[in-house]
């Protein structure tokens, strides 16, 4: 029996309910007909043109991404624009697109539980609550580590990117309590301080907020790790796939009738770095 998009959506909407997303977010079904058959599902962080082309060439019927395609208003879907070309490609190729963004961040399991696991955390609690949904997580490592050793272990658990991870804090500082937020996180510094975290693992840390956070800490905790937006959120994809297939199987859908693929496209926008300071270097010189 053919699996329909509606059957898959019923699971996705249960895992990642739209009302758990932040009010500014745009989540859910973007393209597709609930009655259309689904035999191959593609997973990616971003619905970029390269990802959509990969899904099309792979014969996907459904593309599930973390980031929304139409987060901000657009006034044209002409193929002369990237958004227009993306929507046109999805529709012409008969590919449904489903986006789970901040509702996947707050889910348990979700984006942040996957990142917490990569940090070595086994028990966590919400970092803060926003609009009734948890944002971020905080928990303790089994034992204290040097900041440099923790950062190196985290880097080994994340996909490699051109920029690697950036660390603000003393090389030998002992750390144990870890706060995490996949994606952009410099709006939650107050919550991080209130959590008594030794380290905050997130991404997209801008100069002034990060600099002010370190000034407030007077050189102490919380130390900062910018691990990259794409890298911190990409860990969720395999978890989402496995959980979706297990749930569909429980509902009588034969998992052997569904093929899945996690995108091999690295949608981190950076390609190389020049002149990076060696690990353990100092600010002098």
Image (cartoon, rainbow, N blue to C red):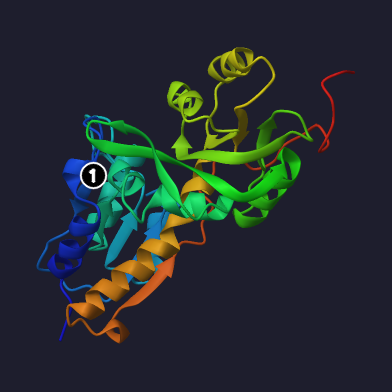
Q: Residue at x 18, y 45 (%)?
A: 18
Q: Residue at x 66, y 14 (%)?
A: 218
Q: Residue furthest right?
A: 285
Q: Is residue 26 left or right of residue 175?
A: left
Q: Which residue is mark 1?
A: 27
Residue 224 placement: quadrant: top right
Question: In this orientation, does residue 56 appear?
Answer: no
Q: Is residue 261 left or right of residue 22?
A: right
Residue 220 x/y as whole percent: 67, 22
Residue 67 placement: quadrant: top left
Q: Nearer the viewer, residue 74 or 157?
A: 157
Q: Nearer the viewer, residue 36 or 66?
A: 66
Residue 152 x/y as whole percent: 72, 48
Q: Residue at x 55, y 27 (%)?
A: 205
Question: Dot 1 surroundings within 10 Å: few (below 14), some, or many (20 or more)?
Answer: many
- Where's the N terminus, which quadrant? bottom left
Q: Is residue 171 above or below residue 103?
A: above
| Element type at mark 1 | loop
Q: Residue furthest left?
A: 35
Question: In this orientation, does residue 26 appear?
Answer: yes
Residue 82 x/y as whole percent: 36, 40
- Where's the C terminus, which quadrant? top right
Q: Nearer the viewer, residue 234 or 272?
A: 234
Q: Is residue 239 left or right of residue 200?
A: left
Residue 219 x/y as whole percent: 69, 19
Q: Residue furthest front?
A: 143
């Amino acid at each position: 029996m053919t699996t329909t998009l509606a059957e898959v959506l019923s699971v996705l909407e249960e895992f990642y309910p739209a009302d758990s997303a932040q009010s500014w977010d745009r989540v859910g079904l973007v393209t597709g007909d609930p009655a259309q058959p689904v035999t191959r599902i593609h997973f990616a962080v971003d619905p970029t043109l390269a990802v959509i082309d990969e899904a099309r060439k792979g014969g996907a019927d459904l593309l599930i991404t973390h980031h929304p395609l139409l987060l901000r208003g657009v006034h044209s879907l002409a193929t002369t624009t990237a958004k227009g070309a993306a929507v046109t490609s999805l529709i012409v190729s008969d590919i449904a697109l489903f986006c789970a963004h901040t509702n996947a961040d707050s889910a348990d399991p979700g984006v942040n539980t996957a990142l917490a696991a990569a940090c070595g955390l086994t028990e966590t609690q919400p970092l803060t609550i926003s609009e009734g949904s948890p944002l971020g997580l905080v928990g303790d490592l089994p034992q204290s580590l040097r900041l440099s050793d923790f950062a190196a272990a985290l880097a080994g658990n994340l996909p490699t990117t051109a920029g690697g991870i950036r660390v603000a804090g003393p090389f030998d500082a002992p750390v144990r309590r870890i706060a995490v937020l996949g994606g952009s996180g410099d709006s939650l510094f107050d919550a991080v301080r209130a959590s008594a975290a030794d380290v905050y693992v997130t991404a997209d840390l801008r100069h002034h907020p990060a600099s002010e956070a370190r000034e407030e800490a007077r050189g102490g905790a919380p130390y900062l790790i910018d691990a990259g937006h794409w890298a911190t959120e990409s860990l969720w994809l395999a978890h989402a796939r496995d959980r979706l297939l297990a749930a569909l199987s429980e509902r009588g859908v034969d998992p052997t009738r569904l093929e899945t693929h996690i995108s091999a496209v690295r949608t981190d926008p950076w390609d190389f770095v020049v002149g990076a300071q060696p690990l353990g270097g100092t600010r002098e010189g």
